[in-house]
Image (cartoon, helix red, strand yellow):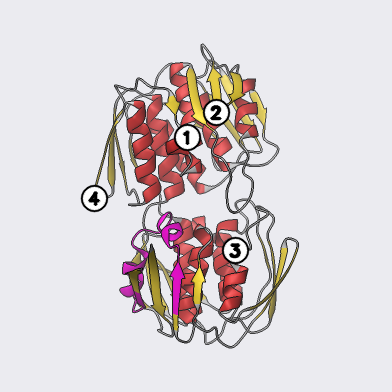
Amino acid sequence: MEKLLISGGQRLKGKVSVSGAKNAALPIMASTILSAGQHRISNIPLLRDVNTMGNLLSHLGAEFHIQNSTVSLDTRKINTYEAPYELVRTMRASILVLGPLLARYGQAKVSLPGGCAIGARPINLHLMGLEKMGAVIELEHGYVTARAKRLTGAEIYLDIPTVTGTENLMMAATLAKGTTRIENAAREPEVTDLADALNSMGARIHGAGDSVITIEGVDELGSLEHQVIPDRIETGTFIVAAGITGGDITIENAKPEHLESVIAKIQETGIQIEKADRGIRVIGSTRPIAKDVKTMPYPGFPTDMQAQFMALMAIADGTSIIRETIFENRFMHVAELRRMGADITIEGSTATVKGVKSLKGAPVMATDLRASASLVLAALSAEGETIIDRVYHLDRGYEAIEHKLRQLGANVKRIKE
């Protein structure tokens, strides 16, 4: 089991480059199922989930290669339409092969993703939309089986703006007969990036990035050549890293327009954020000012930045109220931050954070991806040493995180038991 050992108190300075967005890369990789061809996707983050998706596509019959942050996929020999539990159980995004398999081959059998540490993320809206498009769906023995000779366009309203649901239905609709309209669609930049990739293959998608997406079905799609957008959550995490250490860093390959709510909120705390030549520059203050925040679907403050913001508020001047409205179990990092001296109380979906002058290093344990990021941030500002266990959570969403932090002057290293 690997751990991170961090000696806090170093003011981060210098430049760091953000990797490609995992949550854009995975659906774009899945979208190549829609076309029997050779595909090339660049700016791919080198993460375990990317390899898992590649292994899943290989299981289906595709040829998968990754080199220098570029994925090559040859989908001309796909001959299996089942995504087994052994592959799906490690990554919820595996459900994204359901729509493309059904649309192109008329059949798909995909294992249900199962539970999630941060709360329930059911796929009922995926299935409802596919049924409206004419699919026959069966749930049996932990698998979703879907069949349709050819999907047909439909009017679909999503009760909640689910990202993977929007992506699955959008991909399925590209090869459907007629026009599909998705209302209350997710508006995240990753959804827009997928739509851009599909349109470059010959799809006819309009409105991605807004709450209504229209897809005119086509008979076939061509090969894909696409560059994935930068990871906005990694960008946000480095913004907090600069702020929590009183640092001065330039974050390259960042798109500030994807993080307007985060940047606005963090600027309220007294941290300076300004545009730079190739990204943004962040200059921390002596001590951030406590501010309240409420997580919301995009373009609101993202739930994936809540834990990192809480780490910042743990050392802020004053008291902040943090409301989590997306996932019911997304305060699991609180107990670990308390071990480091944070003053946090929870009542339902609301956390009250009373800022302390400084955190203290302690042995802590990561419980999920963003929780692990909050512990890294807390450790960077803490007095003494912090050992973070179960960092495999961190590795699911941050490429070479300790190397990037070291180049900014952090005292961090990976150790083994």
Q: Position of residue 410 (x, y in %)?
A: 36, 78
Residue 332: where, in percent of width, then height? 61, 63
What whole-number distance in Å separates the C-alpha atoms at marks 4 and 1?
30 Å
Q: Secondary structure at mark 1?
A: helix
Question: Which label sits in the foreground, 4 or 1?
Answer: 1
Q: Earlier in the sequence, mark 4 or mark 1?
A: 4
At horizontal 50% and vertical 29% (from top left) the residue drawn is: 110
**Badge 4 local density, few (<14 within 10 Å), some, or many (20+)?**
few
Residue under numbered circle 1:
85
The residue range painted magenta reads 386-412
Quick check: marks 3 and 4 in contact, CB under 8 Å? no
Vertical relation: 253 (above or below) 187: below
Residue 367 lies in the magenta-colored region: no
Nearer the N terminus, badge 3 or badge 4?
A: 4
Q: Is residue 407 magenta?
A: yes
The residue pinned by badge 4 equals 68
Task: Read off the residue under disc 3.
Answer: 306
Q: Are marks 1 and 2 in contact (CB under 8 Å)?
A: yes
How far is the residue under mark 2 from the one under mark 4?
35 Å
Q: Residue furthest front?
A: 417
For the question of whether residue 55 can be seen, the reply is: yes
User: What element does badge 4 sit on?
Assistant: loop
**Residues at discs 3 and 2 in contact (Cβ within 8 Å):** no
